[in-house]
Amino acid sequence: MNAPAIATRGLTKRFPGGQVAVDGVDLAVPGGSVYGFLGPNGSGKTTTIRMLLGLITPTAGTSTLFGDPARAALTRVGALVEGPAFYPWLSGTANLLRLDAANPAADAATARRRTAEALDRVGLTAAAGKRYKAYSLGMRQRLAIAGTLLSRRDLLVLDEPTNGLDPQGTREVRALIKDVAADGTTVFVSSHLLAEVEQMCTHIGVMRTGRLVAQSSLGDLRSAATARVEVDTPDVTAAARVLTDLGLRDVTRAAGRAGAEIGTTAPEHVSDLLFRAGVSIRGFQVVRPSLEDVFVGLTGEGFDVDS
């Protein structure tokens, strides 16, 4: 089997004074995935990323990229950490050329061609000659991602790539990430925006106070969540009695509605018993928890779900 794009074992970072920012994290990021690294601000996401990229040294633990020690594989990685930083008075093209020139492994003879291709990839060809200070936030983020694409990368690590963007800029960056991943590049996206992660990621890792509290494919995480049956009815008491007699858990009552965790019970069996009991049904649906509901259950706290 191919080695994971990212794998860590017991990755830990303690700062002077005893603060533990990252505590024994075991990441397993499949190659070719779009992996959403979720958690509230201060949960240890950026510190973890900085250790993966060799920007700070772990206190304990190991990390590998594509099966090799992380530092040895960094030439295969493009990264955007804590926002873009470019010269405001230079154009997009000039900024990327300077960035490329700082890479000792880059071929100077192909720099202009690769820069033009990277700008085209992120939809900035028309703004290539415009000064960076005139770029919108979305354009600045796309230019930063273009900088990670100047050379072929097997892994992109993006720390809060939609942070501070308006809805249009967010959509632009989201579409770009999907496009890059479609070419086979593994994308590791740190975020606190659940709505964004849910729309573009195939796998999820959830951090809370320095610990990795969940990790799986998005599909597995959703399927593991307990679905509920919700019945809109004027006969709330009778409906709740049927749900209870079925042995369903967490039976609830509200104005005009009864519900319960459905577990493995077939929905058609529930509706049939309600009908046989003479319960008037105005509406019947099976509802799976949202990604936000799942994470609140995992971490005991909410996330920013705005996009």
Image (spheres, rainbow, N blue to C red):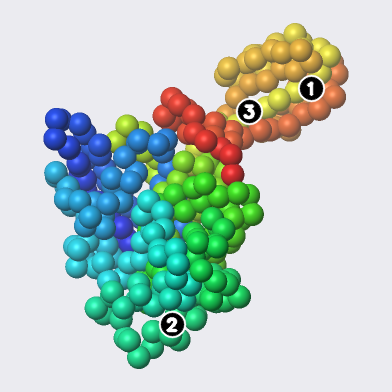
292 or 266, which lies in front?
Answer: 292
Under circle 1, the secondary element is strand
Q: Which residue is mark 3?
A: 228
Q: Is residue 57 visible?
A: yes
Q: Amino acid at mark 2?
A: Arg
Sequence-wise, the earlier of marks 2 and 3 is: 2
Q: Residue 267 at what x, y percent from top left?
A: 70, 32
Under circle 2, the secondary element is helix
Residue at 81%, 12% in the rendered image: 235
**Is 299 displayed left or right of 274 in the figure?**
left
Dot 3: few (<14), some (14–19), or many (≥20) neighbours within 10 Å? many
Q: Which residue is mark 1?
A: 232
Camera-side mark, 2 or 1: 2
Q: Which residue is mark 2?
A: 114
64 or 97, which lies in front?
Answer: 97
Label 2, label 3: how many angstroms apart (C-alpha)? 52 Å
Residue at 14%, 44% in the rendered image: 60
Label 1, label 3: how many angstroms apart (C-alpha)? 13 Å
